[in-house]
Image (cartoon, rainbow, N blue to C red):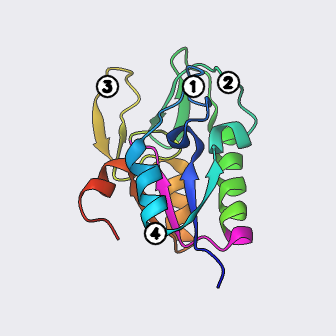
């Protein structure tokens, strides 16, 4: 039997693709994968959409994604979301573990576009598309709370 494949934000696995050039390594993600005997399929929708690492921080403002200096990067985020969804389909992923609060991967809450660390209800661009495609999407903090 083939191992289950789970789509995972690459930064949570230790890849230095966070906007700052660092990672968001999360031990509970690797533990979850190990316990399920699942294979990680790492994605970074922002990089997959053509953005560099490091890059200027971005947040969702209304229906757009803008950087701190006001540059509209929505198209790169949409392209990256589409690439992540294609990867999920190609690999047969039904679950995604994504970086919370991210403008691409946030699940349930994202920053409000003010760059003041204020959260509002909503999903990142990739998280929203993956949900539309039928994936179960969760953030890293859900793994310690009896997640599916």
Image quadrant holding the N terminus, namely bottom right
Query: Quick one: label 3, few (<14), some, or many (20+) residues within 10 Å?
Result: few
User: Which one is closest to the eye, mark 1 or mark 4?
Assistant: 4
In this view, 10 is above or below 39: above
Q: Are marks 4 and 3 in contact (CB under 8 Å)?
A: no
User: Which one is closest to the eye, mark 2 or mark 3?
Assistant: 2
Residue 148 location, quadrant: bottom left
Magenta stretch encompasses residue 3: no
Point out the tag, 3 or 1, that comes first from the N-terminus: 1
In this rendered view, identify the residue nearer to me: 84 or 93. 93
Which residue is label 2 attached to?
53
Q: Are marks 2 and 1 in contact (CB under 8 Å)?
A: yes
Instruction: Locate residue 23, reporting x and y percent.
Output: 53, 30
Point out the tag, 2 or 1, that comes first from the N-terminus: 1
Point out the tag, 1 or 4, that comes first from the N-terminus: 1
Instruction: Locate residue 76, reporting x and y percent.
Output: 69, 39
Which residue is label 4 attached to?
36
Point out the tag, 4 or 3, that comes first from the N-terminus: 4
Rounded to the nearest angstrom, the CA distance separating label 2 from label 3 is 21 Å
What's drawn in magenta, residue-wise?
Answer: 89-100
Q: Which mark is residue 82?
A: none
Which residue is label 1 attached to?
19
Q: Which mark is residue 117?
A: 3
Magenta stretch encompasses residue 97: yes
In this view, 117 is above or below 106: above
Q: Secondary structure at mark 2?
A: loop
In this view, 109 is above or below 144: above
Q: Secondary structure at mark 1?
A: loop
Rounded to the nearest angstrom, the CA distance separating label 2 from label 1 is 6 Å
Point out the tag, 4 or 2, that comes first from the N-terminus: 4
Q: Secondary structure at mark 3?
A: loop
């Amino acid at each position: 039997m083939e191992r289950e494949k789970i789509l995972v934000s690459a930064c949570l696995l230790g890849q230095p693709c966070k906007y700052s050039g660092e990672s968001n390594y999360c031990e509970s993600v690797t533990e979850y994968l190990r316990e399920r005997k699942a294979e990680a399929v790492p994605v970074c929708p922002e990089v997959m959409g053509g953005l560099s690492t490091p890059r200027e921080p971005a947040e969702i403002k209304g229906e757009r994604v803008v950087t701190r200096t006001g540059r509209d990067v929505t198209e790169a985020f949409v392209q990256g979301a589409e690439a992540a969804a294609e990867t999920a389909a190609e690999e047969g992923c039904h679950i995604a573990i994504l970086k919370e609060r991210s403008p691409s991967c946030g699940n349930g809450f994202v920053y409000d576009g003010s760059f003041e660390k204020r959260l509002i209800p909503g999903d990142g661009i990739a998280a929203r598309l993956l949900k539309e495609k039928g994936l179960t999407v969760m953030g890293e903090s859900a793994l310690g709370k009896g997640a599916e």
